Image: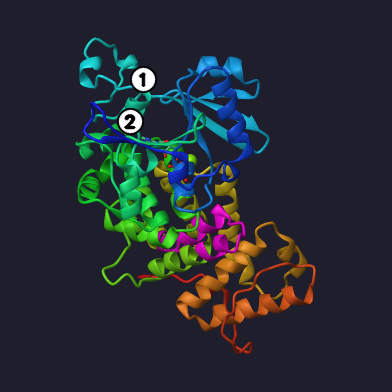
Amino acid sequence: MSITSAKRHTFTIIPRNQHPISRKKISENALKVLYRLNKAGYEAYLVGGGVRDLLLGKTPKDFDVTTNATPEQMRKLFRNCRLVGRRFRLAHIIFGPEIIEVSTFRGHYQGLEANKNKVESDLITSHDGMLLRDNNFGSIEEDAQRRDYSVNSLYYNISDCTLHDYTGGLKDLQEGTIRLIGEEPEKRYREDPVRMLRAVRFAAKLNMTLSKKTAEPLSRLAALLKNIPPVRLFKEALKLLQVGYATATYRLLCKYHLFQHLFPLISCHLTEDGNSYIEQMINRVLYNTDQLLRNDTQVNPAFLFASMLWYPLLLHANTLMKKKHLSYFDAFSLAINDVLQEQCRTLAIPKKITNLIREMWYFQTRLSHRHNVCIHTVIEGTEFHSAYNLLILRAEIENNSELLVLSHWWKKRILIDPSNKITIPTILNCNEDLICSHSRLIPHYDSI
Ligand code: ATP
Ligand code: MG
């Protein structure tokens, strides 16, 4: 059935027997929420990644629901409901570990006009055009236009199991195109610059292509990410790099000059040929992360950041040592503080994680001692396994015989203790008779 809406797109309703979404594939809790809303007389739809991924035959990461019930009405309807977000108010319906996110249909906002009579604290958009609040409720048709990408704007109606397409999302899904909704991509990115990160995330995850108009403004507007609170950017960074498509995502982030606004300490060292130690480390650690996730193995964000920032840390330590005439260890300690502080300006890495990163970095020096160490104390250290994996990565990247010997030595110690469940990547066979000198293992690189 096709109905032409007042908007530019053709509104299509796809009946139950013409789309593959089955209720069996929807989480029980999401169904409970949808039915409860419907029974109380509200409209209720599954929307977003849940619908998109089910149509692609993938397992959705989570299920998002949208309704014409307001957050306050939802609070009355669900005992297990928590209202969250100021900029974008939502209801979280909590079922133990599963949270169903329910949004109220968003309406159009009046843009700058609405700002005119407002005091500063009550502004709807910032001077850069960023939406400071998006709590203007409206109809489902308006809601569809307020979403980011057409493939994310498909609605599954629980009352008759039909699929509603207001923005051409189905065609884009079939053609593998990520298309920003609306005629003014720049305005949409300005409203919320995180949409730029979401564009590359979906392109990488779904193996799709950005439409020309969607891709064009990215490099030009990438700097708008500086307006995003670091806490939000940290969460986005994890979604970019720790969901199984990090390698492809990294390439796109670099291509559209977005990477430098997340990891300025790394990007300033990226080279033309892309083969420096820093780049080799990034490629390996992202590849390994993707592989682990593909095998359903948990990944550790502290390890990811510790590895990615390792060579920038060494370079900085080296500079400090020369400039301030410090001992290497003092320079290394100071550099750890500087690097973490600087990185947290763009991505607010929680303290719990920065502490682990610190520990992994200090562990690199502990692991370089083979004599007079209490092996058990080292092996039982909380971050030993991650630190050991970082040591191996370093050895392989630098093809450094001393590091290889050291990795091999620790590997043997771990194998002696069968209770140690460590995954040991294959490393080259190496000659253990080589002498390891501590000073050479934390190298003073002039260029990495
Ligand atoms: P994922 O698989 O990562 O959950 P998703 O598309 O479901 O992908 P969510 O962050 O869960 O992403 O958001 C749910 C839906 O809310 C999106 O599909 C999209 O329709 C809408 N949405 C989320 N963030 C934005 C945004 N910044 N601007 C506009 N719409 C957004
Ligand atoms: Mg989702």
Is 412 on the left-hand or right-hand side of 171? right
The reply to whether the C-beta atoms of the residues labelled 1 and 2 are less than 8 Å apart is yes
Residue 294: image location, x then y, percent: 55, 62
Q: Is residue 42 visible?
A: yes
Residue 42: image location, x then y, percent: 50, 19
Q: Is residue 276 above or below residue 319?
A: below
Tag 2 residue = 146
Q: Secondary structure at mark 2?
A: helix
Q: Which corner quadrant of the image does residue 236 belong to?
A: top left
Q: Is residue 213 above or below residue 97?
A: below
Q: Is residue 264 visible?
A: no
Q: Dot 2 surroundings within 10 Å: few (below 14), some, or many (20 or more)?
A: some
Is 269 on the left-hand or right-hand side of 438? left
Residue 21: image location, x then y, percent: 50, 45
Residue at 52 percent of width and 55 percent of height:
333
Q: Which corner quadrant of the image does residue 425 belong to?
A: bottom right
- Residue type (three-letter) at the residue carrying disc 2: Arg
Is 167 on the left-hand or right-hand side of 73? left
Q: In which quadrant will I find the N terminus?
A: top left
- Residue type (three-letter) at the residue carrying disc 1: Gly
What's the CA distance linking mark 1 and mark 2? Answer: 10 Å
Magenta stretch contains residue 308: yes
The magenta span reads 290-317
Q: Quadrant of ligand 1?
A: top left
Tag 1 residue = 138
Magenta stretch contains residue 238: no
Nearer the observer, 147 or 321: 147
Label 2 beta carbon less than 8 Å to ligand 1:
yes
